[in-house]
Image (tube, coloured by chain):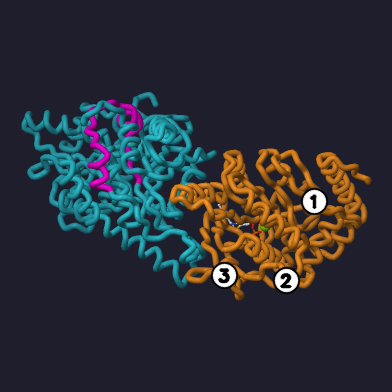
Amino acid sequence: MKEVIEGSHAVSEAVRMARVQVMSAYPITPQTHIVEALSEYCADGRMEASFICVESEHSAMAACIGASSGGVRTFTASSSHGLALMHELLHWASAARLPIVMAEVNRALGPGWNIWMDQTDSLSQRDTGWIQLYCEDGQEVFDTTLQAFRLAETVNLPVMVVLDAFFLSHTYEPVDLPDQETADRFLPPFVPNIRLEHENPCAMSQMAPPGHYMEMRHAIQGAMETVFETFSEIEADFDAVFGRKYGMLEAVECEDAEVILVVTGTAASTCRQVVADLRKKGERIGMVKLKMFRPFPLEAIRETLGGARKIAVLDRNFSFGASGIFAQEIRAALCNHPGHPQVFGYIGGLGGRDITTDTLETIYRMTKESPEPARESVWVGLKEEE
Amino acid sequence: MSRTAETIDTAELMYPGHVGCPGCGATIAMKLALRALGEKTMLVIPACCWAIIAGPHPQTSLKVPVLHTAFATAGAAASGLRAALDRQGDTETTVVAWAGDGGTFDIGFQALSGAVERNEDFLYVCYDNEAYMNTGNQRSSATPFGMRTTTTPGTNWKRSRKKNIVEALAAHRIPYAATASIAYPEDLMRKFEKAKAMKGGSRFLHVFATCPTGWRVPSEMCVSIARLAVQTNIFPLYEVEDGNRYTLNFKGEKPVSEYLKPQGRFKHLTQADMKEIQEMVDEDWELLMRKIGLDPCG
Ligand SMILES: Cc1ncc(C[n+]2csc(CCOP(=O)(O)OP(=O)(O)O)c2C)c(N)n1
Ligand SMILES: [Mg+2]
């Protein structure tokens, strides 16, 4: 049944229907609505779960690690400074091969304090071994969160479901919510592959000397490489039950496109409009919405973008001293591809600044008119004075 | 009831061949603790010497399940594990966080304070060797006044007092907080048994554990040094229930110099320094006696 709910509550509803058993989180704007709803579900009995109100995000992830090692389905949510504070334990969770699911609301890092949309927080956690999935709207948030548990529990790696601050977390949209039986049909109860137990007392996450460490890391990469197939299977199952699928990336009007815009999150919705409008005017514009960032869908990127002429990547994030992070990854993915396209990098929408149809149209025109990228990144929407 | 060799449960839950230093007090502490706790125990161990002693992959020196975890997280990870067991209907298992003084007094203090404020149903054990020994004897806030460490070397030996962790925990009004010593195994095991039986809330044990390597004492003096700490009242044995009911377990009579002199870590101290330490010990003892409701001189 369709209900008009906030993006944050699309997360909470999915977590409830996933029958998560232990949650732990620490409040930070704009993640609070997610965990407030979950606290209510625990209090009023709609969820049979424990919500551990810890004193920091570092402890929130540690509590999830403890709970997941004990063999239950776990969830947390965070954002920005909270995610940064968790950093040490993000590495711990993935290397311990724990299927923890987290909702991460993309928010800028200070100083100055800024609670608005920016992707640098989640992208700074690129190398922690978490699967990262970026969402465009409330429905995708709900669907991806539910799928995330199956994905995490199949490959034994943690999953971060990423949504834009406010543009998504606090925006009300109609979301199709299934009944519990249908959700159960898609997501069976959690059966841990490993857990602490008296029948077979083992040490988990103990010291790993040089003779073992590399193999363990290699195994994590091995698991990452299975994600593409597993994700597709899970999406196919989901599609069979719910009639929706998204793909690791989605190509819109790319076949004959002269310029392909690569976007993530809610900017994809704006971009769909721009593509439709400009196509009507005869412009050969296409769009790729990137959903999966880790593991990076190399093959799919090469297939979709390898034959294009010009690519314009919009980054709502920045790696100081280098460039936009999505652009870097796409350049790296294409550099060994014969006849690869030119990659134009654009930085925009940092710290909550709007990405409008005008912004995207400007990016399209600049790319179309430039014979080649003049700089690694072009900042769009900067005020002249600053 | 006092224990005899016959009544002590000697079923070992530790394997021989662990990698603790000769005479390691923390290892004695674990051995005694597990005898009291029994096999329905799960350990949560953050970074510390015990993260090494418990063995590298694929070995373990313990016969109970162990969750190794990041340095600052014992309190939080143990909370999560407890919740997981409860959710699966296992209320029998005792979850035991087992951390060093650095992991308890310093980097893990926030997570510990948060956990005991929630009155999490677990036993938190701090084995205290009075410095960061895993990393080579750097000072912690459990390092006593007067001790030389690798970060308080030479004439810069530690001038601030040891943090009183049991009082800090008692101030959280948890059901049980107590000190124990490897030199008093009956008392120590009684406290572990008592703590195990007090299910439903947070229990904290502060266990004095000599580190012959870091303290620069011969390994065979491990236990006698720990005994002197109690006999000189520098480490009093006592219990606090609900943060306000104090019980003293032992009253020492000896001067602190007897404890300080045999240890390399205090070798540089002058008579005047030792006198200053004696005054601090007397002052702390008086404060403790007032809380217990005893006459400090009686
Ligand atoms: C976040 C973090 N900082 C520093 C370290 C390095 N480190 C590992 S163990 C340790 C000291 C542990 O001291 P303590 O808790 O007293 O235990 P002990 O080694 O004395 O048994 C330190 C500083 C670490 N593992 N993690
Ligand atoms: Mg120590």
**Label 2 vs label 3: CA separation?**
25 Å
2 or 1: tag closer to the N-terminus: 2
Mark 2 in CB contact with mark 3 (< 8 angstroms): no
Mark 1 neighbour density, 10 Å: few (under 14) some (14–19) many (20 or more) = some
**Label 2 vs label 1: CA separation?**
41 Å
Task: Residue A378: name its quadrant.
Answer: top left
Give residue B6's mark.
2
Residue A171 lies in the magenta-colored region:
yes
Q: SS at mark 2? A: loop
* Residue B256 % position (x, y): 88, 56
Residue extending farthest to the bottom is B17
For this rendering, which residue is in front, A30 or B248?
B248
The answer as to whether the residues below labels 1 and 3 share one chain is yes
Residue flagged by tag 1: what amino acid is it? Phe
Chain letter, orange in picture: B
Which span is picked out in magenta? Answer: A160-187
Residue named by callout 1: B145
A173 relative position to B89: left or right: left
Which of discs 2 and 1 lies nearer the camera? The answer is: 2
Chain letter, cyan in picture: A
Which of discs 2 and 3 lies nearer the camera? The answer is: 2
* Residue B129 % position (x, y): 71, 59
Q: SS at mark 1? A: loop
B205 relative position to A211: left or right: right
**Label 1 vs label 3: CA separation?**
34 Å
Residue flagged by tag 2: what amino acid is it? Glu
Which of discs 1 and 3 lies nearer the camera? The answer is: 3
Residue named by callout 3: B61
A212 relative position to B55: left or right: left
**Residue occupying the point 8% across, 45% down:** A255
Residue extending farthest to the front is B1
